[in-house]
Image: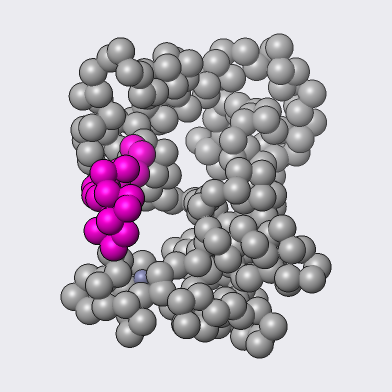
Amino acid sequence: MREFWAFRFQHRESEGKTLLQGGRLFNQLAVDCYAAIEQQRLNYIKAHQPEMRADLYQGLEDAVVAGDTDASAVGRRIVLPSSFTGADQDKPVTPEDIDEFICAEIPNKNVDPLAYETVVRSMVHGPCGPHNRNAPCMVDGKCSKHYPKKFSNQTTIDEDGFVSYWRRNKPSNTVTINRVEIDNRWIVPYNRDLLVLFNAHINVEKCASPKSTKYMYKYTYKGIDFATIVIENNVDNPQNNGE
Ligand SMILES: [Zn+2]
């Protein structure tokens, strides 16, 4: 099923794009497909417990059952392999785990010049607000993406799972773009290796809720950027006229 939907969700020149242009309806379909694929995987695991040697966990199961005084609470236990997404529930994601993969700071120019160049070129938001009231992100006089973010000396996760990345207030982490001094509050979160590999704007965020899954699908399938350009004669230099 995964392969089928992965195939259907691609853009092809030779086919209609009704599905991909479905907007919110398409987001909903993507989430439904994801849920169906996961259910299919779970059913497979449930039906193939012997091959997965789930009986090896019997000792563990006995111990758990022994502590269970309520007989009605004892059901059939299904062991999920560690390769199943989300199976390893023992270790919650910590801010340190997030810091290992995601960064929202301007890299040190001397230590990692390549990352510095790429972040400055691709990962600076705006600047908007007082610097540019007409920026595309401005809605009712405010940045709809909530930039500039707040400075923070550490990454934090609130009770809704929302992550605030560390953005330290360091004079060395600044760059001047279009006469505006940009610091770590303006950096869109990224993964250093992905950014350098593709040399493009790649926003990487920690996702945990169904809402973020929808957001992710929207991003993947929202289509390419378009620009309208007009080519005119060079009026300042008559010699080039018509070229
Ligand atoms: Zn903005």
Query: Which SS does the magenta portion mostly show?
Result: loop
User: In this view of the protein, can residue 218 be seen by the observer?
Assistant: no
Which residue does the image show at 28% across and 14% down from the upper left? Answer: 15
Residue 79 magenta = no
**In the image, is 44 to the left or to the right of 37?**
right
Indicate the quadrant of ligand 1 in the picture.
Answer: bottom left
The segment highlighted magenta reads: 223-243
Taking depth in this image into account, of 237 and 203 the one nearest to the observer is 237
The answer to which of 32 and 80 lies nearer the viewer is 32
Tell me what residue is drawn at x 59 percent, y 40 percent: 86
Q: Residue at x 71, y 18 (%)?
A: 52
Q: Taking 14 as reference, is 111 left or right?
A: right
Depth check, front residue: 224 or 240: 240
> Is 39 situated left or right of 224 in this image?
right
Q: Quadrant of residue 49?
A: top right
The C terminus is located in which quarter? top left
Name the foreground residue: 90 vs 143: 143
Q: Is residue 156 above or below residue 72?
A: below
Residue 228 included in the magenta stretch of the image:
yes
